[in-house]
């Protein structure tokens, strides 16, 4: 304790003298510790720069009572500016602990070569790199899709290898597990569509047609689209994170070197699970959405239950329903593919898994919406 | 280990690495590596941290394309073969990854069993017997039902070792097998490696920093140097220690001891702020 109070009483001090004209001697005294008022290295740098006769800097630390990294940082600056100006900095006058730390800091060094990352290449080179990079990436995506297709055919030919238990688990996880959130969102979507629609229809006294609007909107578009977006955020992101973590842990390497294709073993069960579950979720979502719409139509505007029911049955054709169901199966493939693609191509760093999940969701949602648009155009052209 | 395989293979090295250069993008990690590993030999790859030992292993086991050069298993030119042949070669290789790489969604038992299920048509009960035996070899008897997340790092490493040995492969690759193990387990591991070689004639390629274990098990070594980015020494470690002139190799094999001792002595009679 005594020691401590003494130290606080003696902050770091610094004096200079010149035993001979070409030597600059720095006397260090007191306590040089972080958090204390300390002399700045700038002062020394200025003095040295002002006198071109100086050839050597030496230290005298006999009055020094204590030090920590603060002193090291101070000295590093002096050594750096000294080396730049071609002045020798002699460390012999420093406490031996300081000398050792300097020694250690200059020997523990990663092998060179990694610095090349830091050098900025010319603009054209960078553009070229980027272009080649994205070309390679697209080739990678095509590779992935091709491999997935082959794996699918092997599955049909019953030569694909994966554990059925995994498929069961994944189905459990992405089917029943998603019901609560799908229920909530679908009911709300049904309610919103009904609200927006009924206000307009009322103008014409045609409230009863709200059943048609909600029914067709849910069956054709909203059911499939909403489940797809929910599943992308829920399951697609989870796929990316699971496979990403496996990649980081070298688990995927361990599959490859065992001659087991990660595509068959990890990706196939996930695609299958989603392709099986998405249509079911979509039908479920349709029903919940229609119920949500009915809640508004029957509860707030006085349509009777039978009226609403009849109207819905009349409006919904098998074609309407199957468009939604087919779309949801396609969305299932897209979700699984983008989740797994980003998972398997995840880097090895700590942030890589997070990035993989983010990219998977962003790409997946874009793909879903674009595909939905394509479906709209095609069905329109076919007059369905 | 295949007794049916009585061709005059023994003449030829089991693994040959010829003029290998490996790189991540434009960053060359190691270049011009050439060495060969005899059947039944325990071969150690040494070198400082980050010099490219794991990368070399990745190239040798088919996880990373070499930038240049060849890897031969017997007379099979690994990187120029098609996938089917490569898989056939890999079938005879067991690998312990630096971080274990147990499959996290499966129990320890299932991890060890999967290679057996994939490549043999043993009955499930027979497989579970083998699994128990392999786990007991690494001191993990009775841990079949645990998940990798439920055991310690060192235990995971040992479980991964059991998985690598599941198929009694002809070649075992170990990336720093003793890291994360206590001295006694590390010693037992050395004995196990020697035993595998004796009983099954397994060729073992070990990446290691552990000097004690290197001297205990290695028949042959190569030393990779990060600065010159190539191998700067090879041979039996004891011979190497006795004969090498290269200061880097010497420093590695002696843990840089002479230098440190000199420093320590110098420290004693110089200033030390804490003594005041
Ligand atoms: N995926 C990667 N992408 C880019 N560079 C990499 C990658 N993996 C490793 N490196 C670089 O390659 C070099 C060698 O890495 P490697 O993992 O082979 O080292 P190591 O000898 O196994 O080291 P350690 O003993 O610490 O495990 C390092 O400089 C590292 O930065
Ligand atoms: Mg390594």
Image: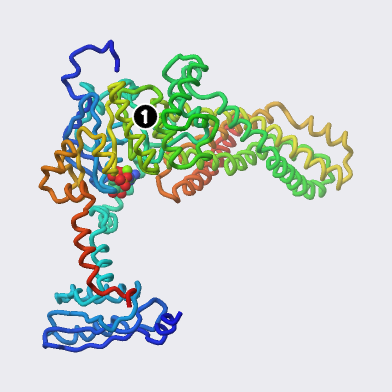
Q: Please state, as top left, top right, bottom left or bottom right, where the C terminus of chain B lies in the image.
A: bottom left
Residue where numbered disc 1 is placed: A257
| Colour mapping used in the image | rainbow
Residue B247 in picture, x, y percent from top left: 14, 51
Residue B181 in picture, x, y percent from top left: 39, 42
Residue B221 in picture, x, y percent from top left: 20, 37
Is residue A129 shown to the viewer in this render? no
Q: Quadrant of residue A230?
A: top right
For residue A123, above or below residue B242: below
Q: How many numbered discs, if any? A: 1
Residue in the picture at 20% in, 12% down: B7
Name the chain letter of the residue that bears numbered label 1: A
Is residue B147 shown to the viewer in this render? yes
For residue B226, above or below residue A166: below
* Circle 1 Cα neighbour tier, 10 Å, few/some/many (<14 / 14–19 / ≥20): many
Residue in the picture at 39% in, 76% down: A34
Q: Quadrant of residue A182?
A: top right
Q: Quadrant of residue B62?
A: top left
Q: Quadrant of ligand 2?
A: top left
For residue B5, above or below residue A303: above
Q: Nearer the viewer, residue B183 or B167?
A: B183
Q: Nearer the viewer, residue A223 or A149?
A: A149
SS type, badge 1: helix
* B125 sits to left or right of A69: right
Q: Nearer the viewer, residue B7 or A77?
A: B7
* A277 sits to left or right of B131: right
Residue in the picture at 32% in, 86% down: A13
Q: Nearer the viewer, residue A74 or B220?
A: B220
Residue in the picture at 54% in, 34% down: B146
């Amino acid at each position: 304790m005594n020691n401590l109070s003494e130290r606080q009483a003696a902050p770091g001090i610094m004096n200079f003298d010149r035993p001979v004209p070409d030597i600059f001697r720095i006397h260090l005294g007191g306590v040089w510790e972080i958090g204390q008022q300390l002399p700045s290295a700038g002062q020394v740098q200025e003095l040295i720069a002002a006198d071109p006769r100086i050839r050597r800097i030496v230290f005298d630390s006999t009055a020094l009572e204590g030090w920590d990294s603060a002193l090291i940082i101070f000295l590093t600056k002096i050594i750096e500016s000294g080396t730049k100006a071609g002045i020798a900095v002699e460390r012999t006058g420093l406490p031996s602990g300081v000398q050792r730390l300097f020694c250690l800091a200059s020997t523990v060094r990663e092998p060179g070569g990694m610095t090349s990352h830091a050098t900025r290449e010319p603009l054209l080179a960078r553009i070229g790199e980027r272009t080649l990079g994205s070309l390679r990436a697209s080739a990678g995506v095509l590779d992935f899709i091709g491999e997935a297709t082959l794996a699918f055919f092997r599955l049909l030919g019953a030569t694909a290898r994966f554990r059925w238990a995994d498929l069961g688990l994944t189905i459990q996880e992405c089917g029943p597990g998603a019901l609560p959130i799908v229920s909530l969102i679908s009911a709300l979507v049904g309610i919103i569509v009904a609200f927006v629609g009924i206000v307009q229809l009322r103008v014409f006294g045609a409230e009863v047609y709200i059943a048609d609007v909600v029914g067709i909107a849910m069956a054709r578009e909203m059911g499939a689209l909403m489940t797809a977006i929910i599943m992308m955020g829920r399951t697609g992101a989870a796929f990316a994170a699971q496979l990403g973590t496996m990649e980081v842990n070298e688990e995927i390497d361990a599959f490859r070197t065992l001659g087991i294709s990660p595509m068959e073993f990890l990706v196939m069960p996930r695609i299958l699970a989603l392709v099986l579950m998405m249509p079911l979720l979509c039908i479920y979502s349709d029903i919940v959405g229609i119920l949500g719409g009915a809640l508004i139509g029957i509860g707030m505007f006085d349509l009777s239950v039978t009226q609403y029911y009849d109207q819905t049955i009349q409006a919904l054709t098998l074609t309407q329903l199957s468009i939604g169901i087919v779309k949801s199966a396609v969305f299932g493939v897209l979700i699984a593919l983008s989740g797994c693609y980003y998972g398997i191509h995840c880097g090895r760093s700590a942030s890589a898994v997070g990035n993989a999940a983010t990219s998977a969701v962003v790409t997946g949602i874009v793909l879903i919406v674009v595909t939905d648009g394509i479906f709209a155009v095609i069905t329109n052209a076919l007059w369905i | 280990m295949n007794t049916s395989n009585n061709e005059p293979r023994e003449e030829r090295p089991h693994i040959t690495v010829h003029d290998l250069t490996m790189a991540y993008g434009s960053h060359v990690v190691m270049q011009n590596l050439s060495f060969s590993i005899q059947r039944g030999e325990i071969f150690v790859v040494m070198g400082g941290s980050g010099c490219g030992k794991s990368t070399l292993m990745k190239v040798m086991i088919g996880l990373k394309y070499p930038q240049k050069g060849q890897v031969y298993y017997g007379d099979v030119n690994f990187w120029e073969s098609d996938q089917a042949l490569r898989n056939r070669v890999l079938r005879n290789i067991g690998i312990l990854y630096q971080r274990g790489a147990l499959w996290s969604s499966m129990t320890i038992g299932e991890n060890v069993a999967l290679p057996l299920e994939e490549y043999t048509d043993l009955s499930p009960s027979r497989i579970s017997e083998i699994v128990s035996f392999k786990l007991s070899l690494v001191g993990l008897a009775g841990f079949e039902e645990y998940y990798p997340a439920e055991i310690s790092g060192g235990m995971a490493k040992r479980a991964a070792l059991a998985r690598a040995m599941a198929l009694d492969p002809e070649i075992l690759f170990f990336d720093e097998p003793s890291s994360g193990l206590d001295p006694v387990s590390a010693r037992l591991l050395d004995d196990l490696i020697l035993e595998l070689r004796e009983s099954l004639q397994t060729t073992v390629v070990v990446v290691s920093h552990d000097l004690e274990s290197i001297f205990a098990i290695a028949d042959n070594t190569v030393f990779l140097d990060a600065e010159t980015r190539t191998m700067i020494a090879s041979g039996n470690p004891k011979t190497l220690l006795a004969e090498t002139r290269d200061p880097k190799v010497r420093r590695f094999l002696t843990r840089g001891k002479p230098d440190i001792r000199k420093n320590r002595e110098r420290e004693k009679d110089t200033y030390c702020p804490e003594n005041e």
